[in-house]
Amino acid sequence: MSHAEVDDLVQRARAGQSRALGRLISLVEDASPRLRDVAAELTPHTGHARVIGLTGPPGVGKSTSTSALVTALRAQGRTVGVLAVDPSSPFSGGALLGDRVRMQDHALDPGVFIRSMATRGHLGGLAWATPQALRVLDAAGFDVILVETVGVGQSEVDVISLADTTLVLLAPGMGDGIQAAKAGILEVADVFVVNKADREGTDQTVRELKHMISLGRREKEGPSWRPPIVRTVASRAEGMTELVAAVDEHHDWMREHGELSARRRRRAASEVEAIAVEELRGRLGDVRGGSALVDLADRVLAGRTDPYTAADELVAGLRPRR
Amino acid sequence: MSHAEVDDLVQRARAGQSRALGRLISLVEDASPRLRDVAAELTPHTGHARVIGLTGPPGVGKSTSTSALVTALRAQGRTVGVLAVDPSSPFSGGALLGDRVRMQDHALDPGVFIRSMATRGHLGGLAWATPQALRVLDAAGFDVILVETVGVGQSEVDVISLADTTLVLLAPGMGDGIQAAKAGILEVADVFVVNKADREGTDQTVRELKHMISLGRREKEGPSWRPPIVRTVASRAEGMTELVAAVDEHHDWMREHGELSARRRRRAASEVEAIAVEELRGRLGDVRGGSALVDLADRVLAGRTDPYTAADELVAGLRPRR
């Protein structure tokens, strides 16, 4: 792909053409060397979109909730980009098929763009790819970008926590999980959503969440955001107005308290760092034409050196010795 | 902790003291600076253990299967270390509590060591921590190490695929998921386990798996391992003898075809690379006392530079300019 073709693609993506948008995100998936040009052209046009992360354990209704949120945001006239991250996990395929069916409600709406993104095989993984895909959607002018993680692994949660606002979905009857994992959930959640709130056990789940939130607050100093708990039944679009209101309230709070720019700075720093780390990883793989790492691995296997000393030697190989 | 204390800890771990083993794995979780000493002392004593990875979607019976496998291996007189990776995910806490209960069957057996490992917060994550924890258990002399991933995210699957033998667990009635994700599963599975094989739909799941495996084989050249499918009912310890036999058969096949050393070389290379990358990530964070990354992030946010150019500048900062 020539520089002129990249230029054309970026112009068409910014004009709202979904196919061009889709191709740009494919470049991210493929870790294309053209991304450097893409990023240079996109960056001046970014910073408008609100990025909302949405995560939660399997079966909690993430895709149904995403779809219902899209509908609620569209009703307010806001345009929405949806990025479903890491369908590449061997186990999320089934859920993804389900997503696509639900998402068909929005297929004919030009104000909505939906895309799943696979990053499997690229070492930098989600931390490298997600901010770059967000940059594409941001530059394309969407008012809101929803990032949904299909998996529940470590990298997925790390990435979702880079959103402006992170929604953590739970469903009634998951009390044990909440108790055991409260530290982890407290860290990433800006808004808790108890979905399937027409089911038995909803009150108890809300009560446990409240208790957990109050414990978390005592440990913090200064003004801090208290994550609200919104009850929804996404399959019937119940509670979505309240959910959008909670997200907007969090956004306003962050803007007032300087937290919005702090978070976006963290996201940008994380993006820059991930690109730099991948550049260095590539160079490590090239030390002595790639033979250095193989030789060092063999020496570690034979017990002749330890992995830390081997890593030192690999890093030292980055610089030509004088 | 002094060098002498590390030395003592390593000696006691190698003598089979669980508390010392546990403390060494805590050092890995905490990314302790002492790991360099630990690795230097452990490395000469490694290479004995067979590493078996065990993964699969939630609800498939991973911990029950792990526990049943431990029992079957112990019946043959083999010692077993179990490493449950990434209970740090906000959502795996519930499952973990369940694990612990099931694992209590083995609590009094000195030939079994069970430990869960959390790595959340350390950027190198599972790719950095898991091989180092395996090294601890390997040097302690266990015949078999079972690595179980609780999550189903990208990093979890990447890590489990570094085992000598990877078991992918499925359960009847997951046909859609298998179809959609066949490429990903084929990649990592050495042995398929259809657990809960007393349930309806088992034959269909086995049939679909067979079809998938036959498709995968056509694409490969040379002698290749055909992943067997073992039916189990782990809760009643059914099929475990067959499962252990399949794992041993895979091990023998790898040894005959040079694949065992190739895999272990990949694991060692991945460990060395992960340590080197983390060293470089640390240095990137220190460029201009940490202010470089913050400044660059601000410039990206303001649209004055793009993340690739910023990353170049950060990497250039690693070397003193002349």
Image (tube, coloured by chain):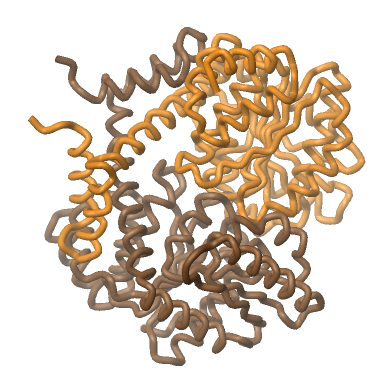
Chain colours: A orange, B brown
| Vertical placement of residue B200 versus B181, above or below | below
Is A18 positioned to the left or the right of A123 in the image? right
* Front-lying residue, A128 or A282: A282
Q: Residue furthest left?
A: A322
Task: From the top left corner, tell me how far across and down residue B194 is, in percent.
Answer: 66, 75
Please say whether residue B289 is visible from this viewpoint: no
Compared to A271, does A102 lie above or below? below
Q: Residue at x 77, y 42 (%)?
A: A63
Above or below, A139 against B197 in this view is: above
Most foreground residue, B262 or B120: B262
Q: Quadrant of the C terminus of chain A?
A: top left
Quadrant position of residue A86: top right
Residue at the spot x=57%, y=51% of the render? Answer: B153
Q: Between residue B114 and residue B286, name the one nearer to us.
A: B286
Number of dots carrying numbers: 0
Q: Residue at x 66, y 59 (%)?
A: B182
The spot of residue B128 in percent (x, y) is 37, 50
Quarter of the figure that contains the N terminus of chain A: top right
Residue depicted at 43% across the width and 32% down the height? A274
* Left-right relation of B32 to B121: left
- State which quadrant residue B289 falls in: top left
Vertical comparison of A195 with A251: above or below: below
Residue B152 visible at all: yes
Residue A59 horizontal side relative to residue A227, left or right: right
Q: Residue A165, how many percent across, how many down?
A: 64, 28
Where does the image place residue B155, in percent across and percent down from the top left? Answer: 50, 50
